[in-house]
Amino acid sequence: MNILKKIFMLPVSLSLGLVGCSVGSSKTYVLTTTSFGYDPSYRPYIVKLNGEEVGGGFGAATKRSAVITGPQYITWGQTNIRKQHVAKNIPYLTKEDLKGKSYLAVHLYPDDTVEITLTEGRNMPSATKKGLEIRSKLIDELNENDKK
């Protein structure tokens, strides 16, 4: 009976093991992370990438974070009203995207869309041109409203 179990279980365990390696597998990279929030009406806090907290402070604060390949689900809090945001889009990172990279930045736009940028070596991430333009426009609008 023991030999029969081994003969039966060997092919089953091998096939299941191979399926597990090819379906849904992801690789984890440890990168220095930060985030940039472009809505001047609040400061984002506890920015998370797949449940892992990343750095913040408009690029001033960094954190070593585990980043996995695949879809990137991003959430963050809004300080002034304790609102929780969930990104409307889901960036996707591959092994090729992350290979050789040192830094990852999450960019949070006022419409709750996000963008991820990656840099190599000692090149710290910086704000995106798109984000700075949006932020500048919103600041001008806030200043106009204050004058009224």
Image: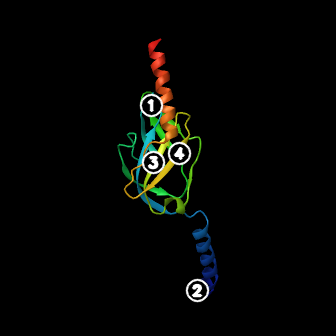
Q: Residue at x 37, y 40 (%)?
A: 57
First in residue order: circle 1 vs circle 2 = 2
First in residue order: circle 4 vs circle 1 = 1
First in residue order: circle 2 vs circle 4 = 2
Q: Residue at x 46, y 26 (%)?
A: 139
Q: Residue tagged by mark 2?
A: 2
Q: Which mark is residue 82?
A: 1
Of the residues tagged 4 and 1, which is closer to the observer? 4
- The residue under label 2 is which amino acid type? Asn
Q: Residue at x 44, y 41 (%)?
A: 36
First in residue order: circle 1 vs circle 3 = 1
CA–CA distance in space, label 3 to label 4: 8 Å
Q: Position of residue 145 (x, y in %)?
A: 48, 16
CA–CA distance in space, label 1 to label 3: 23 Å
Q: Position of residue 124 (x, y in %)?
A: 39, 50
Disc 3 crowd rating (10 Å Cα; few below 14, some 14-19, many 20+) is many
CA–CA distance in space, label 3 to label 2: 55 Å
- The residue under label 3 is which amino acid type? Ala
Viewer-proximal residue among 70 and 11: 70
Question: Mark 4 touching mark 1, by CB under 8 A?
Answer: no
User: Could you say which quadrant of the image residue 5 lies in?
Assistant: bottom right
Residue 108 appears in the picture as rendered = no
* Total number of numbered discs in the rendering: 4
Q: Position of residue 100 (x, y in %)?
A: 45, 63
